[in-house]
Image (cartoon, rainbow, N blue to C red):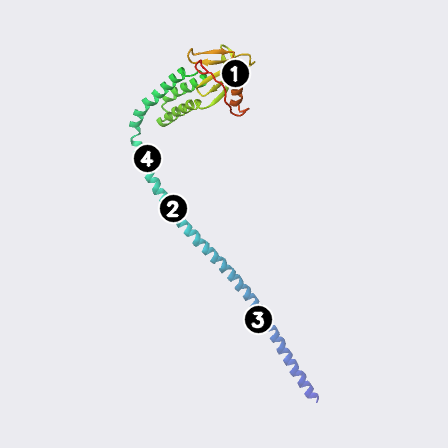
Amino acid sequence: MKHFFMITILIVNLYSNSFDKSKDTTVKTNSSLASSQKKIDKTYSETETLLYEYKDTLKENQSQKIYNKDLREFIKSQQKEIESLNTQIAGIEVTAREVMPLIKNMVVFLDKFIQLDVPFLLDERQKRVERLERNVNRSDLSVSEKYRQVLEAYKIENDYGRTIESFQGEIDGKVVEFLRIGRVSLMYRTMDKNQYGYYNKETKSFQISDESDLSKSIDKGIKIAKKRTSPDLILIKAGGAK
């Protein structure tokens, strides 16, 4: 019986040792599997990242191809434009010789026109002509720029005929406030409002007026020009007649 008990203990010990070894093996296996899974997950993540990068690279490459195509088309278009400009430039010298006399004549005509016109803003307008006369003879300005400046001066003069304006000036050394209505009429009043008058185109001189209606019209017209009141009908003097 004693021997049987010892044999039983021996068998239990053997099973126990075997179970412990199996348990250790299982733990090691699980640990190894977990480590392998981590490596697999890491590899998968890296693979997925590389895949996205690859797709992005493909898209970028496609976009670059489209951009290069558009760029080639643009360059081709610019080359055609350059060829066209070169053709035009070839005729510029001939055009310049033909246009310059016209430009100079336009400046001369503008100067004469201002001298014969209603005498408003004379200093400003004459200085503009003097500047044109200087620029027309400058070698550092292109013909197109000279022509542009002359056209701009003509536009300014043309606009005077369609606008109403109030500004200060002098008549016989006396400071007055002018009222210009297009080129139809140029009227004035003294700063103290004790004297009113207008430019007589027939006598080419300023004429004093004691007409109360005209004085009221000048006062109203100046307010309109300064945008202090809304536009309205006013009495004007032009060429010595109502």
Q: Amino acid at mark 4?
A: Leu
The answer to the question of whether label 3 and label 4 lie on touching residues, with beta carbons closer than 8 A, is no
Residue 179 is situated, as x and y percent measured from the top left of the image, at 49, 18
Q: Which residue has dot 3 on it?
A: 29
**Left or right placement of residue 134 versus residue 177 in this view:** left
N-terminal label among 1 and 3 = 3
Q: Which mark is residue 213?
A: 1
As drawn, 183 above or below 71? above
N-terminal label among 1 and 2 = 2
Q: Nearer the viewer, mark 1 or mark 4?
A: 1
Q: Amino acid at mark 2?
A: Asp
Residue 136 is situated, as x and y percent measured from the top left of the image, at 36, 22
Q: In the image shown, does 33 or 51 lie closer to the viewer?
A: 51
Q: CA distance from mark 2 to mark 4?
A: 22 Å
Q: Which mark is residue 36?
A: none
Q: Which residue has dot 4 on it?
A: 85
Q: Amino acid at mark 1?
A: Asp
As drawn, 32 above or below 80? below
Q: Residues within 10 Å of mark 3 (few under 14, many from 20)?
A: few
- Give the structural element (helix, strand or loop) at label 3: helix
**Residue 137 in sight here:** no
N-terminal label among 2 and 4 = 2
The answer to the question of whether label 1 and label 3 lie on touching residues, with beta carbons closer than 8 A, is no
Classify residue 34 by image quadrant.
bottom right
Q: CA distance from mark 3 to mark 2?
A: 61 Å
Q: CA distance from mark 1 to mark 4?
A: 62 Å
